[in-house]
Every structure is written in structure tokens, then in C-alpha cells.
Image (cartoon, rainbow, N blue to C red):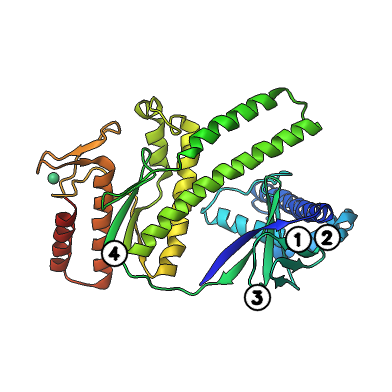
Amino acid sequence: MLLGFKTELKVNKQQRLLLSRHAGVARHAWNQGLALCQQVLLHNSINPDDKIKFPTAIDLHKWLVASIKSTHPWYYEVSKCAPQYALRYLSDALKCFFKKNKGFPNFKKKGKHDSFTLDGAIHIDHRKVKVPIIGWIKTYELLAAGYKPKSVTISKQADKWFISWKIEVETSETPKKQEFIGVDLGINHLAILSTGEIFDGAKSYKKYQKKLARMQYLNRHKQVGSSNYRKANIKIARLHLHIANIRKDTLHKITTYISKNHAVIGIEDLNVSRHLLQVGEPAQRSGSGMLANGKLAVSIADMGFYEFRRQLEYKTKAFGSKLVVVDRFYPSSKTCSSCGEKKPSLSLSQRVFQCVCCGMTCDRDLNAAINLSQEAARLVVLACGLDSADTSRMKQEENEGIC
Ligand SMILES: [Zn+2]
């Protein structure tokens, strides 16, 4: 299977300038293309009888060569791939928007998600990568020499440059400790497994959060655009990157552990609105910890859930396990995992699940995780076409194993 590989580049002053130029051209092409697409959409909405054909990636590129490149000579200072790929990505983003998978693409801003893609003669040696126009760039990491990726994407985070490409990874089936597992992602704990294992988010995040606030506070009177302002901003961006890396690392450890040791993993389908609701509740807002701040909580939860699912999706393939995404309308929190009785409602402040039917008392998130594991098992069995007798037996075994 193909996996993304990303490593940091050791760039000198000249290369830094060249990389920035490439990213700048890619950004300019994207913004120009987006502006054109906006105009076309506006024209078509005003004149429904006289519609213009919506431009494809090829149309956009032709238009760029004909009318933008000629008036912007600095386009010729960089590889032609940079604007070409930018327009291709723009076209993909617009397709996603028309399919209603994503929102309308945004204009790119200098210094935010700077990146560009190149293809052509790319060579990889032990500690360096050769890309067109820019030449050999050193890396910090030892690379497998001889591999030739079709294209590479170079991106900037804080003041660091990274390169990424796709590599072919062999899948290996690992021995599994347990057959079925359910994972509930929560607000109080990062993840709770149906086995009762609890994973907390990175604690250091809170410490850095304070530091970040302090840095931003000290930066408040610096003149925008001044040298000191820029320096301070780089420091802040580095800290942001560090925090993001800690969070990513925690998620990676959890997802690797889960997909390596369990055959079938049940998770809930993303439902951001549910979490928005949870965080927005007064009971939650008055709580402590990093999720006390509503807006912040949403962004953490939001990003964490997407990233968690993305990692599980490829890791389950790599380790030979199966990911089952349970429908978002499945009442994992409200259902009793022991007898299956569904509560009409469960307030968010109730952290302990108590069943009036069978008298089971269990942590709310653990109950949800067990339900997800059972639902995943049911769906897998259903897909395999086994009879319902087996399902109930399996359910029973699950219950006995946990409670
Ligand atoms: Zn019950």
C-alpha cells in the first residue's frame, strides 16, 4: 500500500529563498484561479440563460499561461510544475465542494500553509534529495537511496521546510490480542476502549498552552511587520508546531496500539455537531482543563477526531485488521451495553450510566465503547452472512468478558 512519507529539509539561505518563491507562485496561481472560478460562478448565477462552461484544471492552466504568466515574469523563475499542481489541487478542491464533501476553497495567504508540488527528475540519496530547479537539498534523516518518487510536495511549517512523497509499504498482519474492540472518543479522556483501557491526551499540552498565551501577550505591542514582530511570530509558530506534534504523536501511539492488537475496531462516525453541543453545554463549559474553553475545545476535538479516523483507516490496512465505522445515529451512549435497553435521554452531565432495567452501573464512555464494539461485531457478522444465533452468542461472550 502507498503511504505518505514526510521529512524535514536542511535548507541554506539561497534554497530558502527559492522554496519561498515556488510557494509564492503556487499561491498566486491558486488565488488567481480561484478568483476566476468565483467570477464564472457569479456570472452563471446571474445569467442562467447564458452560462459559461466551468473551467477544468486544464482550462485553468491554459488561461494561466495565456494571460497571467505573460504579465508576471517571475513565474519563469520557478518550475512550471508549481502553478500547474496548484491549479490541479484547486480543481480537486472545487470538485469536492460541488460534491458537498467540503466547503468552498479559501484564498491562500502568505505564510499560512505554504506548499507546492514538483515532479520530474527527482533523486534520493542517503541524506539529500534532488528536485528540479532547486537542486540537491540536505535532509536531517537518513533516506533509502535509489527510490524515485513521481512527485514531491514541499511545505513550510513555522520556519521549517518539509518534503513529502508517497512510498510503497508492505502490509504485515500482526498477531491480535483481541477480536473485537470499540473506541469511544471523549471530552474527558482522549479515548476509552471497550476493554476498559483509558488513553489521556498529552498532558504537556496545557503547560505549553500557558506559554503560548504568554508569548502572544508579550507580542501585543510590537509593530506589525517589524523585525522583532517577525521574530516573535516565528517563535509562536514553532510552539504551535510543537504542540501539534505532541498531539499527533499521542494519537499515533494510540492508533498503532489499537490497530496492531485488535482484529475488528468499532468507532463512531464523525459527528462534529454532537461534540459542538457537548462542549457548548454550560455544564461542560464550567469544567476544568484544556477543554473548558468552548472554541478551543471544538478545534481540538474536531481535529483529533478526523486525524484519529484517518490514522486508523490506513493503519488497520497495514496491520491486517478491520475498521468498522458505526452509523452516527446509533445511540451508543444511551443504550445499556448489558441488556440493550435504550434510555430516552441521557443528560451530558451524567458521567455514569445506570440502567433501570438490569441495574448495571458503568462509566458513560466505557458503556459507549462496549456498545460500539458490539455493534461493530454485529455489522461484521452481518457482512459475513452468518446467522443471528452466532451474533447473540458473540454478544454474550463480549458482555461476560467485560462486565
Ligand atoms: Zn441494562
Classify 248 as above or below 343: below
Q: Position of residue 220 (x, y in %)?
A: 69, 24
Q: Which residue is mark 1?
A: 82
Q: Position of residue 21 (x, y in %)?
A: 81, 53
Q: Which residue is mark 4?
A: 177
Amino acid residing under circle 4: Lys
Q: Secondary structure at mark 2?
A: loop
Q: Which residue is mark 3?
A: 147
Which residue sits at x=47%, y=38%?
A: 298
C-alpha distance separating marks 2 and 4:
53 Å
The answer to whether the residue labelled 2 contacts the one labelled 1, judged by CB atoms less than 8 Å apart, is: yes
Residue 139, labelled with which disc?
none
Q: Which residue is mark 2?
A: 78
Q: Nearer the viewer, mark 4 or mark 1?
A: 4
The answer to whether the residue labelled 3 contacts the one labelled 1, judged by CB atoms less than 8 Å apart, is: no
Q: Nearer the viewer, mark 3 or mark 1?
A: 3
